[in-house]
Amino acid sequence: MTQQIIKIIPALVGLWFTQALATDITISGTVVASPCAVDTGTKDQTVKFEQARAVNFTNVGDASEWQDFELTLSSCPVSTTQITATFTGNADNDDPTKFANAQGDATGMALQIMTRDHLTEINPLGSLAASVDIHNHQATFPLSARMYTPTGHVTAGEFNTTVQLTFTYQ
């Protein structure tokens, strides 16, 4: 037993006197505010138009009735004061300030989007800003859309297009 202890002591002393090398590790990151939540009524929203008759769209600028809709973002961080929505989609070939009937087969029709007060038109790649309400931490974009003929030559068929939104938070 004494012999075993004599063998272990030099091993322990060697471990005790082994020099340890120190090193520093730098760890960094960024903490950002979470984005606002897009309300369920806004996600994958469909704006439906009443059935339109091609014979009622014989002049450039003829349009259907406005259909109101809105985009709502909620649960915004306190630090977020404004949200900008950027609208993307295919521009109409005859009037690039309107959205094309990209998935429908009716010809001569385009989509016009404006603010609900009909004072500001939103073009493909256009943007619109809304302030975040400091009390309920939400922002609302009240909008209107309608079918619009840039040519005055409309053929019957389906009207269907998609507008994609990208939100930027300030």
Image (spheres, grey):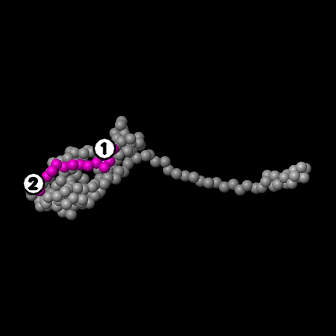
Residue 20, which numbered label?
A: none
- Counting labels gives 2
Residue 56, which numbered label?
A: 2
Residue at horizontal 64 percent and vertical 54 percent from the top: 24
For the residues labelled 2 and 1, the Cα–Cα distance comes to 32 Å
Amino acid type at mark 2: Asn
Callout 2: SS: helix
The boundaries of the magenta stretch are 40-54
Residue at horizontal 12 percent and vertical 61 percent from the top: 153
Amino acid type at mark 1: Gly
Residue at horizontal 34 percent and vertical 43 percent from the top: 39
- Vertical comparison of 89 with 115: above or below: below
Q: Which residue was labeled with disc 1?
A: 41
- On the question of residue 137 being in view, the answer is yes
- Main SS category, magenta section: loop
Q: Nearer the viewer, residue 142 or 130?
A: 142
Residue 42 falls within the magenta-colored stretch: yes
Residue at horizontal 52 percent and vertical 51 percent from the top: 29
